[in-house]
Image: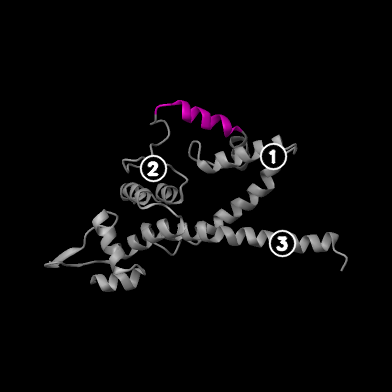
Amino acid sequence: MRISELSRRSGVSIPTIKYYLRDGLLPAGRPTAANQAEYDEEHVHRLRLIRSLIGVRGLSVSATRDVLAAVDEQQGDVHLLLGLVLGALPVERSGRPPRRDGDAEPDDAGAAAGDVAEDVAALAAEMGWKTSPNPPAAQVVAETLETMRALGMDYDWRSLVPYAELADRAARLDLDQLRDAGDPLQQAERAVLLTVLLEPALLALRRLAQEHHSALRFGNG
């Protein structure tokens, strides 16, 4: 397809496509004449993923370039690919994919991250979850628990088990919706959209449900 058709199919403007081509985010098309090239479905899928990473996840162009460089090396491993685009796995500045367990040398930062995630490690063990070492989400949960305890709430990882069970069901639903996207880039794009765009709606649904159950328990009709 010509660049005009690529723009129409992907929803990305022609000037932006040319910028992505110059900046190395999008691979060049097949030259057909002077200053002209043809593009294919791979370009469509990659543009949609770029748009999702920048416009939906809010990554910078530089961070998106690093993620895409790692994605290029991991298209055969959908699990790692999803971890990269969703931010569950770190991306090295060189664009290389993250190291597997046991490949990285220990450092002070890694040890510190492990210390703050002890509660979440216990929760993950209770749920039977297998995750990467020190994922950012685990640190958020651990720090939240620490803050709640500092404010005088008797709250530990056991209190989160019912919520973790709900999260487990939600995660299964998320991944079920990737089945129809056979191409790895399509799966990555849909995973970003389902995760980032749905999160505010899920929080809003929780608020609506809280209002409903508050009215049932405490309302006076």
Structural distance between the alpha carbons of marks 2 and 3: 37 Å
Span highlighted in magenta in the image = 105-118
Q: Position of residue 26 (x, y in %)?
A: 28, 58
Front residue of 198/191: it is 198
Q: Is residue 166 visible?
A: yes
At label 1, the amino acid type is Met
Q: Which residue is mark 2?
A: 91
Q: Which residue is mark 3?
A: 209
Query: Are the residues at dot 2 and dot 1 in contact (C-beta closer than 8 Å)?
Result: no
Q: Which residue is mark 1?
A: 148
Q: Is residue 116 within the magenta segment?
A: yes
The numbered mark, 2 or 1, whose residue comes first in the sequence reads 2
In this image, 117 relative to 21: left or right?
right
**Residue 51 occupies quadrant:** bottom left
Dot 3: element: helix
Q: Identify the residue at image location x=31%, y=50%.
A: 72
Q: Identify the residue at image location x=39%, y=30%.
A: 104
Q: Identify the residue at image location x=43%, y=49%.
A: 79
